[in-house]
Image: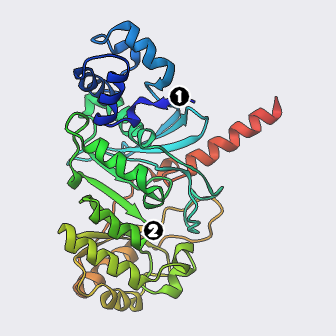
Amino acid sequence: MKTPLCDLNMDELTALVIKYGQPKYRAKQISHHIAAYDCFDEYTDLPKSFIAQLSEEYADRPLKEITRITASDGAVRYLFQTEGGDLIESVYLPHDYGNSVCVSCQVGCGMGCVFCASGKHGLLRNLSAGEILAQVLYIARDNKDKGGVNKIVMMGSGEPLANYDNTIKFLRLVNCSDGLNIGMRSISVSTCGLPDKIVRLADDGISCTLSLSLHAATDDKRKTIMNIAHKYSVKQLIDALKSYFDKTGRRVILEYILIDGFNDTKSDVAELRDLLKGLCCHVNLIPLNPTDNCNLKPPAKKRAYAFCEMLKDAGISASVRRSMGSDVAGACGQLKNRTAEEMAKSSKNK
C-alpha cells in the first residue's frame, strides 16, 4: 500500500526532494499541490521523471469516494474508501458563518458508547495524519465554488486522543501556512475523555477548541452509556479541562447528548451546576440522533429547550445545537455500516 503524499510535513517533503536530487523549493511546490488535492497529472511544474518516482512510492489521492448523500439542509455525507479498502465517513456542513468538515480519525471506534453507530464493529485501525487530512482536502476541492472549507471538526468516527500522534500531526498539517492554513481557533477536537492526553495536548502547544463528550454529570450515570467512564472519573476529566484552559486560555465545550428521561431532568441541572463550578465552559446540548439497534430516544424539542433554559438559570452557558443531516443517516457510522452490509450481501449473492 502506498504512503499518502499528504502524510508528509514540510520538513519531510524537503528531505524527500533532496533524496531524489531535486532542489529544496520543490517541497513548497508539492505542498501547494497537496493543499489543492491535485492528482499527479496536475503537477505540471515538476519534472515528469520526478513525478514518476513519486508515484511509485506515494499516493496522490489516498481516498476514493464510494458514495455521498445530501440532506435537505445542505449537509453532505461522504463515504470514502482508503488505499487499503477500509470505509470511512466525513461530512460537509455549510453555514452562513463558514463551511465545516467533520472528519473521522479511525476506522471504527473502540470506545463502545451505547448511542454511537461508529463503534458497532469495534476499532479496526488508526487513520494516518494524511488520511485524516485527505478528507478535508477532497471536500474542500469538491466544494471550491461554495467557498471551500474554513472550519474543521474532529467529531467523526473514532477517538482523536486515542490516535494521538496522528491527530497532532494532522492538526499541524492543516494549520500549516503552506497548506490550508486553517487556524487553531477554527478547529474543534472532540474526545470522550482521556485526561492524560487532554493535558498533553496543551503541553504540546495545541490550542484548538476542545470538546468533551460528557453526556452525564455523575460517574454512575455516565458508566451506563460510556465504557470510558469505567476508567476515568468525571472529576479527573474536569480537572484536565481546567488545566487545558489554564494553559491555553481557550474556553472548553461540553458536548451533552440529550436522552429522554435519562439526563434531562432538574436533578441533572443541579449536578451539572455543582460539577462545572469554576470551569470556563459552554454546554452544547445535542438531542440524540437515533441509530440502528439503539432503544434510546431524544426528548421532545420543547423539553430540550426547557432543559437549556434551566441550565442558563443555574448560571451555565448553554445552547441547543442545530442537528444537520438527520434525514440521511446523519449519525456517525450509519452510512458506512449500511453500505458495508449492502456490499457484503452483494458479494455473497454473486
Residue 135 in which image quadrant: top left
Query: Residue 70: x, y in percent?
Result: 44, 39
Q: Residue at x 82, y 28 (%)?
A: 350
Query: Residue 132: x, y in percent?
Result: 42, 43
Query: Residue 165: x, y in percent?
Result: 41, 53
Query: Residue 174: x, y in percent?
Result: 29, 42
Residue 296 in which image quadrant: bottom right
The type of residue carrying mark 1 is Lys
Would you say 258 lies left or right of 148 here?
right
Q: Nearer the viewer, residue 177 or 300?
A: 177
Q: Residue at label 2? A: 192
Q: Residue at x 23, y 85 (%)?
A: 278
Q: Residue furthest right?
A: 349
Q: Residue at x 23, y 34 (%)?
A: 147
| Relative vertical location of residue 291 with respect to residue 85 in this rendering, above or below | below
Number of the front mark, 1 or 2: 1
Q: Nearer the viewer, residue 65 or 137?
A: 137
Q: Earlier in the sequence, mark 1 or mark 2?
A: 1
Label 2: few (<14), some (14–19) or many (≥20) C-alpha neighbours in 10 Å: many
- Colouring style: rainbow
> Under tag 2, what secondary structure?
loop
| Quarter the N terminus occupies | top right
Spatial separation of the CA atoms under disc 1 and disc 2: 32 Å
Q: Residue at label 1? A: 2
